[in-house]
Each structure stands twice: as structure tokens, then as C-alpha cells.
Amino acid sequence: MSWDLLWSLLLACALVYLGVQLVRFVRADGDLTLLWAEWQGRRPEWELSDMVVWVTGASSGIGEELAYQLSKLGTSLVLSSRKANELERVKNKCLEISNLKEKDILVLPLDLTDRSSHEAATKRVLQQFGQIDILVNNGGRGQRSLFEETNLDVYKAIMEINFLGTISLTKCVLPHMIERKQGKIVTMSSVMGLVGAPLSAGYAASKHALHGFFNSLRGELAKYPEITVMLICPGPVQSNIVENAFCEEISKKVENTGNQDYKMATSRCVRLMLVSMANDLKEAWISDHPFLSFCYIWQYAPTWAMWLTNKLGSRRVRNFKSGLDADSSYFRPMKKKSN
Ligand SMILES: NC(=O)c1ccc[n+]([C@@H]2O[C@H](COP(=O)([O-])OP(=O)(O)OC[C@H]3O[C@@H](n4cnc5c(N)ncnc54)[C@H](O)[C@@H]3O)[C@@H](O)[C@H]2O)c1
């Protein structure tokens, strides 16, 4: 074989390899550490069964799906949110689809804003299971309104739920994890904890606050290497988040919740959360493109990202002002992975 032929073959192989990597990157729905963990890392099925997991916001959306996927892994569950009936519904479905028994699932209604109740709730969980291996701080609310038109009470309320409620529950559970020198504190942030976007200033602020808080707390816990502090940052995911979002006034509801087809399937988001938990990832970005690439641009070229945000954001605001769903008119439904 001549050298020319050999070089051509090598070049062709290299191009195919680069092509495959490019396609992988374009189809990616997680950051690079997460994709690596999914490909080569520990399986949730090996790591998470037999644990006790406390999920807040378990009555709908991501928290509800998390309860289902965890139940199939055999984890004991504590299901919390404000809505007892909905939690019972989720519990019954968990019992139906898994081998868990009645005693393995505790329904524990809890309001994140009622901070004085968090200590007693923690005691109740310990009384039932004797331990908490994972706390998933998932409960939260979105916001969709312009700053100029939004009452300050809305910003106060969103910080009470998404930030103060989350750190209050963490403060109650952490001493128990420290005593055992092990545990995982998994907090639901968002792509909006990494970037900003018009109409969501209060929501983005509450999620950015979680990053500042938990990234600092992780340092304080460095002497307990078996305690992991994790931040999960999903892009748009199918759930009730828009329906439940705050608007200009506390009592007002979002008028047009729009079409959810373009969003990531809830089951896929939760599968990637489980992979992140099994592999102790400190931060995981879970999102389809273009939101995922937006996170990279925001990190590496913030000024360009902000220029882009202004371009795309002004259309978002226009949609919102004309009564359309702010987002869905941007995106064509994309073919999605379901798990
Ligand atoms: N769906 C998305 O596009 C998306 C993207 C990024 C991050 N998130 C985050 O995921 C988490 C779950 O949201 P979701 O999308 O499933 O929305 P969702 O509205 O379907 O679920 C929110 C859950 O939080 C609970 N909750 C709300 N206020 C509460 C309170 N005061 N006390 C206790 N529980 C309360 C609700 O009852 C519900 O169970 C939230 O923290 C949200 O910010 C969602």
C-alpha cells in the first residue's frame, strides 16, 4: 500500500470521527461531564437503590416523574409539596409501578414558605426511616412578567419559596448528614441560574442565589468528602411550571401557558438527574439545544451572549405583550429522546 493511500485512509477516518463527534455535540442534551457520566459512569440502578430520598415538589412535573423513576429503582421515598391529595395520587402510582410497599413511601405535606415547620418534618422522616440519604430540593415556582409591571411582593414570594425555603430545609437535614458523614443535597436550579432572560428577572435571581449559596456551602463541607452538594440546571422541560408561575401580582395567573411540545420530555430530564446523582456531579446542565449552546456562549463569551439575549429577548417580550405565549412561537417541535 502506498503512503498516499495510507494517509488518505487516515484522513478519512479522522473526518468520520470528527463528524460523529459533531453530530453527538449537536444532539447533546447535557454538559460534557454529564454526557461522559451517562456513557461511562456509574448507573443509577447500581448506586441509588436502597436509599432514602426526600423529594420536595413531588406533586407534579419533574418531582412527580422523579418519584416514579426512583420508585422503580427501589428507593424509599418521602414525597412533599403543599398538595396532600396530589401526593397520595403520586404515591399510589409509585406503588403500582414498583415493588415498593406502603411503608416505603411517606407522604409528608410541606410548604416551603412555612419555615417553622421544616424541623418537625425532618424529625418525622427520621422517625420513619432512620436516615436521609438524598434530599432533592425540587419544589419551586417560575415567574413571567416585566419588572416595570411587577409588584415587589412577587419577588419577595419567589425568593421565599425558591431560595429561603430551600436553604431552610437544607439547614434542617444537613446536621443529620454531617453526623453520618454522608449524603447528597441535590438542588434544582435551572439554565436560568446560569444566564438571564427578560420576563424572568425574579426567577433568574432566585436560581442565581442558589448557585452562590450552594457553591459556597460545598466549600464549607470539604472536610466531609462523602457529602455531595449538587446543582441541577435544566432548560425548558414539560411540566406545570408556566401554569403555576407568578405574574405581575401575587394572585394573578399566566394567561397563555402555550404549547409544551418544544420542551424536553420530563422522563429524559429525570433520567439525566439520576445519572448526575449516581455520579456525584457537582453541577449538571440538562437541556436541548439551542438552550444548551446558549449556556456555553454565556460562559465563554458573555458580551456576545448578552447581545444575543437582547435580540431574542425583545421578541419574547413582544410575544408576551401581544398575549401570545412568550416562548413557544420561537420553536418548532424537535424530535426528542424520551429516556
Ligand atoms: N420545567 C422547567 O422548564 C424547569 C426548568 C428548570 C428548572 N425547573 C425547576 O424544576 C423544579 C420543579 O418544577 P416543575 O417544572 O416540575 O414545575 P411544577 O409546577 O410542575 O412543579 C413544582 C412543584 O413545586 C411545588 N411547590 C410550589 N410551591 C411550593 C411551596 N411553597 N412549598 C412546597 N412545594 C411547592 C408544587 O406543588 C409542585 O409540586 C422547580 O424548582 C423549577 O424551578 C423547571
Image (cartoon, helix red, strand yellow):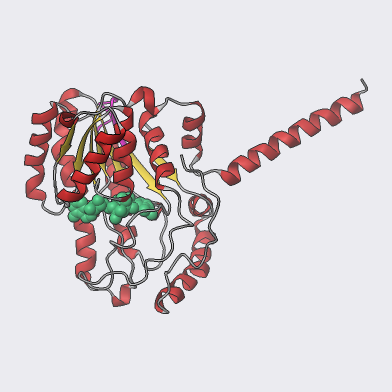
In the image, residue 229 lies at what x, y percent?
30, 36
- Residue 203 in the image: above or below residue 122: below
In the image, residue 252 lies at what x, y percent?
24, 72
Residue furthest to the right in view is 2
The quadrant of the picture occupied by the N terminus is: top right
- Work out whether residue 158 or residue 121 is closer to the camera in this orientation and state it: 121
Give me the residue at 60% from left, 40% from top.
24
Give me the residue at 42% from left, 79% from top.
322
Residue furthest to the top in view is 1
- In reply to whether residue 223 is colored magenta, the answer given is yes
- In reply to whether residue 259 is colored magenta, the answer given is no
Residue 122 visible at all: yes
Residue furthest to the bottom in view is 322
Give me the residue at 38% from left, 39% from top.
273
Q: Is residue 181 left or right of residue 65?
A: left
Q: Is residue 130 left or right of residue 238?
A: left
- Residue 174 in the image: above or below residue 63: above
Quarter of the image for residue 28 reads top right
Give me the residue at 24% from left, 48% from top.
59
In the image, residue 188 lies at what x, y percent?
31, 46
- Work out whether residue 275 or residue 179 is closer to the camera in this orientation and state it: 275
- Work out whether residue 244 or residue 20 is closer to the camera in this orientation and state it: 244
In the image, residue 153 lies at what x, y percent?
19, 69
Magenta span: 219-229
Number of marks present in the image shown: 0
Residue 193 visible at all: no
